[in-house]
């Protein structure tokens, strides 16, 4: 299951599993937010390449407008995916336990 | 353990329920479950995408061998197409040079310990193994 919502401080909260069956829904939600800054991934258990595509497209849009996305509270599995895909260099990423060395 | 799944991305929930049941039955360590799920998803969605005209279901077989998990995905009524031989992705490229897509197989190669492709009698089979830590 997957859920995406807007937090109290304008951040986007994602939860569950961002897989290929949920990527379109995630993209549609993020496309509605013109100046997104933070994506809180505390409740996100899993991400696949489809989810990475959503993040990449969003980041390109935001950077073209002078902004950029910060990904916070990233778990160990997702940190590993980011490292293997080079996404740890495309985004500002903070691990779930706030130890940057885990990335 | 073996099941057939319809060739649609919406089968992923059922696929993960299937792998989850296998993990519990075989006491697969939690530390490798997401890596196996991700590899299954990437290979399954590739079969769906690159043989989209076929109505055949895709078979997923899960086995617990000596200290490793073996997973096979079989696509029936398929033309020979070794998706495991795709070109490498430049993960060091700057964001302007990055395009969505192409990362699935790259991630699989990093996540599993072996990856093999076989083609015979119109059937494509991809098998990977992941060591249990």
Image: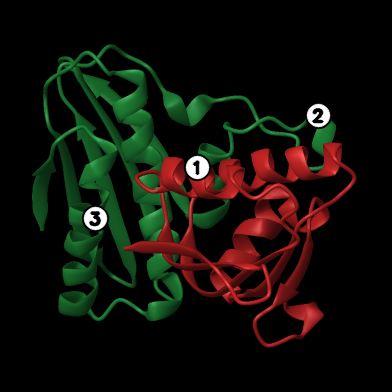
Chain colours: A red, B green
Q: Are marks 1 and 2 in contact (CB under 8 Å)?
A: no
Considering the numbered disc 1 on the image, is that residue within a helix, a strand or a loop? helix
Q: Are marks 3 and 2 in contact (CB under 8 Å)?
A: no
Task: Please tell me whether residue B42 is drawn above or below residue A37 in the rendered image.
Answer: above
Residue B15 in sight in this render: yes
Local packing at callout 2 (Cα closer than 10 Å; few below 14, some 14-19, many 20+) is: few
Chain containing the residue with disc 3: B
- Find residue B94 and report its horizontal and vertical position in percent: 86, 38
Estimate the spatial distance between the alpha carbons at disc 3 and disc 2, rounded to whole Å.
Answer: 33 Å
Residue B24 appears left or right of B104: left
Residue B108 in sight in this render: no
Local packing at callout 1 (Cα closer than 10 Å; few below 14, some 14-19, many 20+) is: few
Chain containing the residue with disc 1: A
Question: Which residue: 21% across, 45% down?
Answer: B11
Determine if marks 3 and 2 fall on one subunit: yes
Q: Earlier in the sequence, mark 3 or mark 2?
A: 3
Q: Residue tagged by mark 1?
A: A28
- Find residue B35 and report its horizontal and vertical position in percent: 45, 61
- Find residue A51 and report its horizontal and vertical position in percent: 52, 49
| A69 and B9: which is toward the camera | A69
Considering the numbered disc 2 on the image, is that residue within a helix, a strand or a loop? helix
Task: Please tell me whether residue A8 is drawn above or below residue A33 in the rendered image.
Answer: below
Q: Nearer the viewer, mark 1 or mark 3?
A: 1
Where on the picture, by quarter, is residue A12?
Answer: bottom right
Q: Residue tagged by mark 2?
A: B97
Residue B13, which numbered label?
3
């Amino acid at each position: 299951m997957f859920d995406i919502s807007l937090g109290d401080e304008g951040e986007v909260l994602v939860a569950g599993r961002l897989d290929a069956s949920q990527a379109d829904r995630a993209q549609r939600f993020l496309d509605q937010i013109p100046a997104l800054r933070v994506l809180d991934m505390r409740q996100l258990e899993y991400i696949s390449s489809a989810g990475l595509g959503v993040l990449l497209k969003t980041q390109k849009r935001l950077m073209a407008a002078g902004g950029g996305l910060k990904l916070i509270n990233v778990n160990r599995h997702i940190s590993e995916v980011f490292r293997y895909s080079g996404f740890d260099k495309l985004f500002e990423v903070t691990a779930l336990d706030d130890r940057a060395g885990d990335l | 353990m073996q099941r057939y799944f319809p060739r649609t991305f919406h089968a992923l929930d059922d696929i993960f329920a299937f792998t989850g049941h296998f993990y519990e039955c075989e006491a697969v360590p939690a530390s490798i479950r997401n890596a196996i799920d991700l590899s299954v998803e990437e290979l399954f969605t590739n079969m769906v995408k690159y043989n989209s005209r076929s109505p055949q279901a895709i078979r997923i077989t899960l086995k617990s061998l000596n200290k490793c998990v073996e997973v096979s995905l079989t696509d029936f009524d398929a033309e020979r197409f070794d998706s495991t031989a795709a070109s490498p992705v430049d993960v060091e490229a700057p964001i302007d040079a990055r395009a969505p897509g192409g990362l699935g197989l790259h991630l699989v190669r990093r996540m599993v310990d072996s990856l093999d492709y076989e083609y015979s009698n119109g059937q494509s089979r991809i098998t990977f193994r992941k060591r249990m830590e």
